[in-house]
Amino acid sequence: MILVTGAGGLLGKKLVKVFDDDVVGVYYKSKPETSRYLSLDLSSLNIKAIEDLSPDVIIHAAALTDVDKCEKDPGLARLLNVDVTREISKVAERINAYLVYISTDYVFDGKRGNYREDDEASPINVYGLTKFEGEKEVMRFSSNYLIVRTSTPYGSNPASGKDNFALWLLRKLKNGEKVRIVSDQVTSPTLNTNFALMLKECVEKKVKGIIHLAGASPLSRYDFSVLLARTFNLDEGLISPASSSEMNWIAKRPMNSSLNVEKAMMLENKPLKIEDALKTLKKEIEENENSEII
Ligand SMILES: NC(=O)c1ccc[n+]([C@@H]2O[C@H](COP(=O)([O-])OP(=O)(O)OC[C@H]3O[C@@H](n4cnc5c(N)ncnc54)[C@H](OP(=O)(O)O)[C@@H]3O)[C@@H](O)[C@H]2O)c1
């Protein structure tokens, strides 16, 4: 049995879907679409309920993902991203489970981009630092683990009660609203469906160590937005470039945290180029009769 934390989140939601009936979804506020689920506030650090279920695989996707909130409340960031990860790693080891920890491109400082798995991490904000410390807890307490770094996830459905960047942008353009989007910050936008399929294959093959599972095309948010507009036949003239220095962000962001995905190219489910990922996104949105985007 596979247990997924953060099962109602942007990535977790897709993960529980690809693993289907073999899965138990752990959630706090966003109930996952699974027949088996467990409601648990992980910040209590009391995770005996997970140990009692004794899953064969634990995919730990829950985290405090709001980068500015982490900066404002480093104590909460540490509790959720480091302490919870430590407890989960210990439980995984006790019950002999294979542990998959979802980490981030923000462990890198962004000075260079195209980061490989063994490049040195050097986070520049509290979110990146606490996720990197989470990685270290996994390596310290678990002997059977995979650390998966991903970047700027997006998908066809809201999750954890909020839109992701792609849905937010499509909604704005559909309403004819002008948007200013950062053009000097580069990441590797990742379609959550592509991510979930790659991760499923890694779990089936029991891949160990560290792997980057992300989209194959490094892009600025601005370039990503223009491609989204073109794919959905919306007016790209509504989008204008902005500099990150104009943003009222609390936390610093890495300038280029794009991930090198050569290692993941060995999988049958490969990182998708942006054109293919956006075609898939469009198809998913068109097939979703509840979507108000199209
Ligand atoms: N979003 C990004 O830009 C990004 C980029 C790279 C890597 N990642 C990593 O990918 C993983 C998944 O991120 P995501 O984008 O899917 O984030 P998300 O949609 O914000 O989901 C995070 C999940 O964490 C859960 N969580 C938070 N506090 C909890 C608590 N006290 N107890 C139990 N669950 C709690 C939330 O559950 P409830 O909603 O049920 O409260 C939520 O489902 C994270 O580890 C993140 O660090 C994210």
Image (spheres, grey):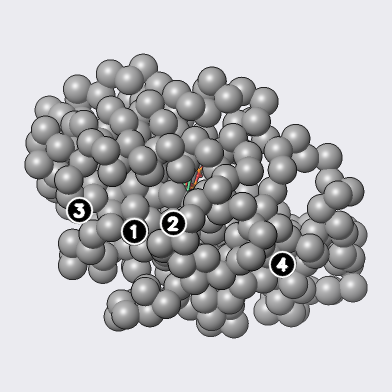
Which residue carries the number 2 mark? 149
Q: Are marks 1 and 3 in contact (CB under 8 Å)?
A: no
Q: Are marks 2 and 3 in contact (CB under 8 Å)?
A: no
Q: Are marks 1 and 2 in contact (CB under 8 Å)?
A: yes
Q: Amino acid at mark 1?
A: Ile
| SS assignment at label 3 | helix
Mark 2, residues whose alpha carbon is within 10 Å: few (<14), some, or many (≥20)? many
Checking the image for residue 21, the label placed there is: 3
| SS assignment at label 2 | strand
Tell us which disc is closer to us: 2 or 3. Answer: 2
Q: Horizontal and vertical percent for residue 253?
A: 69, 48
Image position of 160 (left or right of 101): right
| SS assignment at label 1 | strand
Which residue carries the number 4 mark? 220
Looking at this view, is 289 or 131 the one in front?
131
First in sequence: mark 1 or mark 3?
3
First in sequence: mark 1 or mark 2?
2
Residue found at x 67% / y 25%: 72
Q: Amino acid at mark 4?
A: Ser
Quadrant assignment, res 172: bottom right
First in sequence: mark 2 or mark 3?
3
Q: Between marks 2 and 3, how big is the CA–CA gap?
A: 26 Å
Residue found at x 52% / y 28%: 77
Checking the image for residue 210, the label placed there is: 1
Q: Between marks 1 and 3, how big is the CA–CA gap?
A: 27 Å
Residue found at x 20% / y 53%: 21
Looking at this view, is 194 or 147 the one in front?
147
